[in-house]
Amino acid sequence: MEDEAINIENPFLPENSEIDYLTVKDGTRLRIGYFPANGPAKASILLINGHREFLEKYSEFISDFQIRGINVYSMDHRGQGLSDRVLSDKKKSHNPDFDIIIEDIHELVSRIIKPDTLTHPLYMVAHSLGAHFAMRYLHDHPDVISKAVLFSPFTNLGSSSPFITFIAELYFMIMNMLGFSKMFAPGQARGRKMINHEAAYNALTHDKDRYEWAQRALNKYPELFIGGVTFGWVRGAIKSIHIIRQSGYVNKIKTPILCLLADDERVVRNSTTISLLNRMKNATYEIMTGARHEIYREVNEIRDKMWKKIDVFFDF
């Protein structure tokens, strides 16, 4: 790591962990995690998490890779977790320019992972909004990642009706033009007390204990929490969605991809993702029967099937 290490006892991270901070070119400090393999490493993985997530949430998933002899690198995206927040009001999720996130990922890759120095493959695993970032990274940096597994990618926003989607996008564009970029978008949670945990649990996983793990981490480290999105964040998401859906964009992604989709999906739209995957030459997808959005935090029966597919794809 390039910045001075921050040594903190954290029971919500794997025992074999190195946590540090990386200052990127615009001065933002990103919280970086390195989780070395148990024994000689067969490969390294860049793990890209989703919106409002943090390293602790992936502890079990990371440990599963370590047991398989895989190094894991990950980070809290700017604006969430323990990385620098964009606004002084730290409860607002505000990233109006997703291009910067792609640059952050590449700084982690080029300055910390240094693929040219590795003697084994560098793979990528990404979830939800992280899988959206992954698509953009694989497009912009085609020769860095050997293979990628994408979980439940975020590839669309709003209603399936083109007209309603158009009206929603127009509304958010106007609100940003009027100077409301840094304000919470309608219906967004301004604090933890506004989170409907029953609805969140029912949308994300069937495993109550795994869902509660992240809540216990937030109870111990409340600074990890971030609330709902701003008008600016939504505008940034819309712009980035337009990028990945433009004609010919995903067609240029040559990296072999396995995409795992949830059968009981209530957060993202699988149909849009499948249409994008069908344009890629080396992408396949599997729909995980009975799974909800966070497949990696599902019940053991679903996770066992997930791991069989990952192990075969990465040749673990």
Image (spheres, helix red, strand yellow):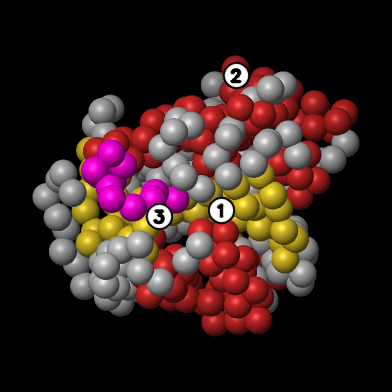
Q: Give me the residue at 55% from left, 40% from top.
A: 255
Q: How many angstroms separate mark 3 from mark 1 (CA)?
A: 10 Å
Residue 80 position, x and y percent, is 41, 49
Which mark's residue is nearer the viewer, 1 or 2?
A: 1
Secondary structure beneath dot 2 equals loop
Q: Amino acid at mark 1?
A: Val
Q: Residues within 10 Å of mark 1 (few under 14, many from 20)?
A: many
Q: Which mark is residue 178?
A: 2
- Left or right of residue 39: residue 175: right
Residue 82 in magenta stretch: no
* Label 3 sits on residue: 45
* Label 1 sits on residue: 149
Single out the residue that lies furthest toward the top: 177
Residue toward you, 226 or 30: 30
Which circle's residue, 3 or 1, is located before the other in the chain?
3
Residues tagged 2 and 3 counted as in contact (Cβ below 8 A) = no
Residue 250 position, x and y percent, is 64, 31
